[in-house]
Image (cartoon, helix red, strand yellow):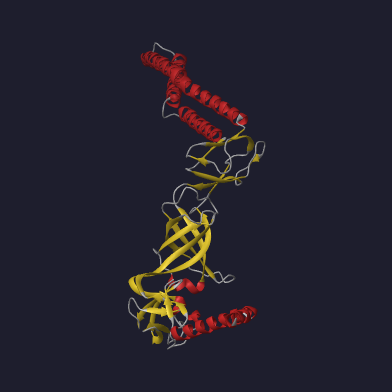
């Protein structure tokens, strides 16, 4: 009966007993926590490669762009390419209405044919005719000279009259004049003569006009000056093309460069030839190498930045002109050096940085000397050794406090 009464009393006070048991468990847990210390994530000092980078964003562009225009004025008859299309050197891009230019070629061909005919006329007709005339004139001169000699002899002997001698003299003078005229005609029609030189000059001018007409006709078809990708198209069929107006913009194939704006405070860290890793914002998981090859000598005062360019020797196929990229430029590297997470170093920017090193289950203050600082790591030059574990700043523990270390 007594046992039953005791059990009944316990049953009626069951909630009180449960609450007391819970309180007791809590007190025991607190006691154990005080005795053993709180659980704290600790980090080991490890040897690794430390890399300091300068991070910036920019865009993709070729080292230069080619603006393609027309060298003549004319109406665009056909546009054979689209924006974004890859083209090869010599490929036809735009055709300008060639009818007027074709007519000019035909006119120049007619003028050249006329000049060639004039040359042939001098060679085949004028010069041979002048040479025959010269032969005849020389023969007449011989006869006139003989007649003059006979008349002069007769006058000397008294058998001839003065009138006959005068006629013979006049005929001799006429024959001599005819010979000189014939010789001049032969020389003029010959290769060194004025008629031939003038005809040859006219032929050369006609040839030049024909070449110019053919060149202008060739200009009616605008060709790609080199391999590349068309990144802009400012022309449609029916538009009047004029010299000096860009119709297409070509990004030449080959080298691709990344243009970045770097904060001027990082200018002292940059050097030509530094390596970098880049990624396009459209493909953040795919990186490709680049090399710093240009640093602008001037500063953009409005943005307090400096323009730099990096060469991507093997750009991925997905890169497009003006695509946004993010670049990590490697400005300093220390190989196989001791490092700790930056979150474990107290007063890292002061002259006396320190860490809490775990020794015998309790953190101890340990001054350190730090070197290179990367994004999440700090190089430790002195103060801790490889394998030492340190407590992060955010753990909120005190030096000498017992803790239960756990690894992340």
**Where's the N terminus, which quadrant?**
bottom right
- Left or right: residue 248 versus residue 385 is right
Q: Is residue 65 visible?
A: yes
- Left or right: residue 303 versus residue 88 is right
Pick the residue in front: 297 or 143.
Answer: 297
Rendered location of residue 291, percent (x, y): 41, 60
Please, which residue is most extreme toward the front here? Answer: 1
Rendered location of residue 400, percent (x, y): 42, 89
Pick the residue in front: 211 or 219.
Answer: 219
Rendered location of residue 384, percent (x, y): 35, 81
Q: Is residue 334 visible?
A: no
Name the residue rendered at 49%, 66% in the picture: 55
Quadrant housing residue 403: bottom left
Residue 285 vs 126, above or below: the answer is below
Residue 163 vs 97, above or below: the answer is above
- Left or right: residue 144 versus residue 248 is left
Residue 70 vs 106, above or below: the answer is below
**Where's the C terminus, which quadrant?**
bottom left
Pick the residue in front: 162 or 35.
Answer: 35
């Amino acid at each position: 009966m007594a046992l039953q009464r005791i059990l009944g009393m316990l049953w009626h006070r069951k909630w009180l007993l449960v609450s007391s048991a819970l309180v007791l468990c809590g007190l025991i847990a607190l006691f154990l926590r005080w005795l053993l210390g709180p659980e704290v994530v600790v980090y080991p000092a490890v040897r690794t490669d430390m890399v300091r980078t300068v991070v910036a964003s920019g865009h993709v562009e070729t080292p230069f762009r080619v603006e393609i225009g027309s060298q003549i004025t004319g109406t665009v008859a056909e546009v054979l390419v689209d924006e974004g299309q890859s083209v090869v050197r010599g490929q036809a891009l735009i055709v300008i209405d060639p009818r007027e230019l074709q007519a000019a070629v035909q006119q120049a061909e007619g003028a050249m044919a006329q000049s060639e005919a004039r040359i042939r006329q001098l060679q085949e007709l004028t010069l041979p005719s002048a040479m025959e005339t010269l032969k005849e004139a020389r023969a007449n001169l011989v006869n006139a000279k003989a007649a003059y000699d006979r008349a002069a002899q007769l006058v000397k002997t008294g058998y001839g009259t003065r009138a006959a001698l005068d006629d013979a003299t006049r005929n001799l003078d006429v024959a001599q004049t005819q010979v000189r005229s014939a010789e001049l005609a032969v020389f003029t029609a010959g290769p060194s003569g004025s008629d031939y030189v003038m005809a040859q000059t006219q032929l050369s001018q006609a040839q030049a006009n024909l070449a110019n007409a053919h060149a202008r006709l060739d200009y009616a078809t605008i060709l790609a000056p080199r391999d590349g990708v068309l990144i802009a198209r400012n022309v449609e069929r029916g538009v009047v093309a004029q010299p000096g107006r860009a119709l297409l913009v070509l990004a030449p194939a080959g080298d691709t460069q990344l243009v970045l704006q770097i904060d001027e405070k990082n200018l002292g860290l940059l050097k030509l030839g530094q390596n970098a890793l880049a990624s396009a914002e459209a493909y953040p998981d795919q990186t490709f190498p680049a090399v710093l090859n240009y640093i602008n000598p001037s500063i953009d005062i409005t943005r307090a930045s400096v323009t730099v360019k990096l060469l991507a020797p093997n750009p991925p196929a997905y890169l497009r002109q003006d695509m946004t990229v993010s670049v990590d430029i490697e400005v300093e590297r220390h190989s196989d050096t001791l490092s700790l997470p930056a979150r474990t170093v107290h007063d890292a920017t002061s002259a006396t940085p320190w860490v809490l090193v775990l020794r015998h289950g309790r953190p101890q203050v340990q001054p350190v000397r730090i070197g290179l600082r990367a994004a999440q790591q700090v190089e430790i030059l002195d103060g801790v050794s490889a394998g030492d574990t340190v407590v992060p700043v955010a753990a909120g523990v005190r030096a000498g406090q017992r803790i239960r270390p756990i690894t992340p």
